[in-house]
Image (cartoon, helix red, strand yellow):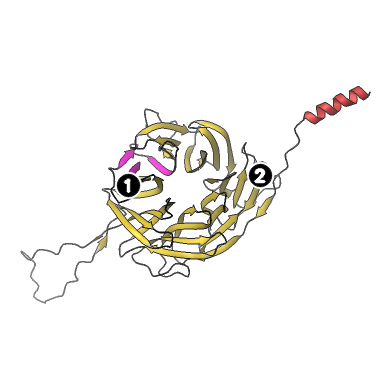
Amino acid sequence: MKKVFLIFLLVFSLQPLPATAAVMKSAKSIIELPYLKADEISDISLTPVSIVLTGTTESTTSTWLSGSLGGLSDGFIANYSSLGAPLWNLRLGSTANEIATSSAIDVDGSIWVLGAGTAITTPTPPSAQGKALNPDNVVLDPAQPTNTPLNRIKLWQVNSAGNLLNTFELASENIIHPKKILIDGANLIIIGDSYEKSVVKGFYISVTKTGVFSPIIKYGIKSTQINSAMSNSDGSITAVGSSGDLLLKVKPLSKTDAVTLKISTTGVLQQVARATLKSTTRTWSSIDTGLLQGGKVSYSNKTEAAITKFSALNKPIWNVRYLSKSSALVASNKSSWATFISSGVIKGISTWKPKNATPVLLELGKKGEVISAYTLPAPAVAIAANNEIGTVVITDSGVSFGLVLIN
């Protein structure tokens, strides 16, 4: 009997213990930044001690941005301590219209801000020859200056104290939407989308830190978009987005596939990985250290947030999908983090059955399991993480931005 008991005890001890279910907690903003018009925060950059916000404002004045509006929109950069205390802010605008979309912190502490802008054009007055008779001497209104579309890549360098050091610009033949800036030694790498009528192509361009732009390189034929990118140790970059085009002889598997692209230091497309599901469209929205990627899968009747950890292109370690009303945004430090608008159950959180779609933030483990979970006060528009500060999420309620910190 004793022997049987010992065998039973040994077998029982080898069985995996049931995982402890995560509990959904409520995360609060440590600061709120109100706005009046269609303002946006597009990116977060973290130092060991501060949080840099990059975005665009259409508000004529602001309680947290100095100065007044230049054109119809200004880019901006604002720096906060790890406790949410304001350090400095700077408008990046002129009488033209500008947007700011991404930022990167250089080794000297300066911050490179990426964006786009318009040019102001003044119509040529009509020639005096052959002008119509004007017997009543009616005074004609002079031709008014107008703005071109967003067809200029803008690049600003700001020092660690918030002073503007340099401004560079490159005119494009098409409407341009630069989305991500990366630092590669003495050069800067810019990726994004170029639009011509109904055609959209991804693009890559390299810039020296003295403002010399390389020729633009485009990817795709009519429906390729690049949403984000990260640097690799060999100097290449890994970019993510979506495409319905033939890329490197790799055919699309659905109308729109989520694509991951490896691009060389000279902008040459080296590898293409496609993620697809039957009768869906997919896209990757973000990528961070360790090939953690976030995106969405759209079916005819539902949307799922998709989070996948890769060991290499096309080699997933784990992947999870959750019913959602948005794409997933991701960030990495000691853990993997993802935020999206949850509209259904989440495996690992037994009590989570939302009646209404709710913004959430998940901490995921080495196998994609949920370690911790938080509801957010509003949908997330940007996320970043490091080991010193923790995980920072910017939410947008429609009237204010919230800064949520998990550490």
The answer to whether residue 214 is above or below residue 116 is above
Front position in the image: 401 or 135: 401
Q: Residue furthest right?
A: 1
Stretch of the chain drawn in magenta: 201-228
Q: Position of residue 322 (x, y in %)?
A: 59, 42
- Residue 342 magenta-highlighted: no
The amino acid pointed to by label 1 is: Val
Q: Earlier in the sequence, mark 1 or mark 2?
A: 1
Q: Residues within 10 Å of mark 2 (few under 14, many from 20)?
A: some
Q: Which mark is residue 333?
A: none
Task: Say which residue label 2 marks.
Answer: 371
Q: Residues within 10 Å of mark 1 (few under 14, many from 20)?
A: some
The answer to whether residue 306 is above or below residue 112 is above
- Viewed as shown, does residue 79 lie left or right of 196? right
Q: Position of residue 333 (x, y in %)?
A: 56, 45
Say what secondary structure mark 1 lies in: strand
The answer to whether one can see residue 135 in this image is yes
Q: Position of residue 239 (x, y in %)?
A: 43, 40
Q: Position of residue 49 (x, y in %)?
A: 53, 57
Question: Where, quadrant-wise, is the N terminus in this rendering?
Answer: top right
- Viewed as shown, does residue 198 lie left or right of 106? left
The answer to whether residue 66 is above or below residue 401 is below
Front position in the image: 56 or 310: 310
Rendered residue at 55%/59% (across/down): 82
- Residue 205 magenta-highlighted: yes
The answer to whether residue 186 is above or below residue 83 is above
Rendered residue at 59%/58% (across/down): 377
The amino acid pointed to by label 2 is: Ile
Rendered residue at 38%/70% (across/down): 68
Q: Which mark is residue 207?
A: 1
Q: CA distance from mark 1 to mark 2?
A: 41 Å
Front position in the image: 268 or 394: 268
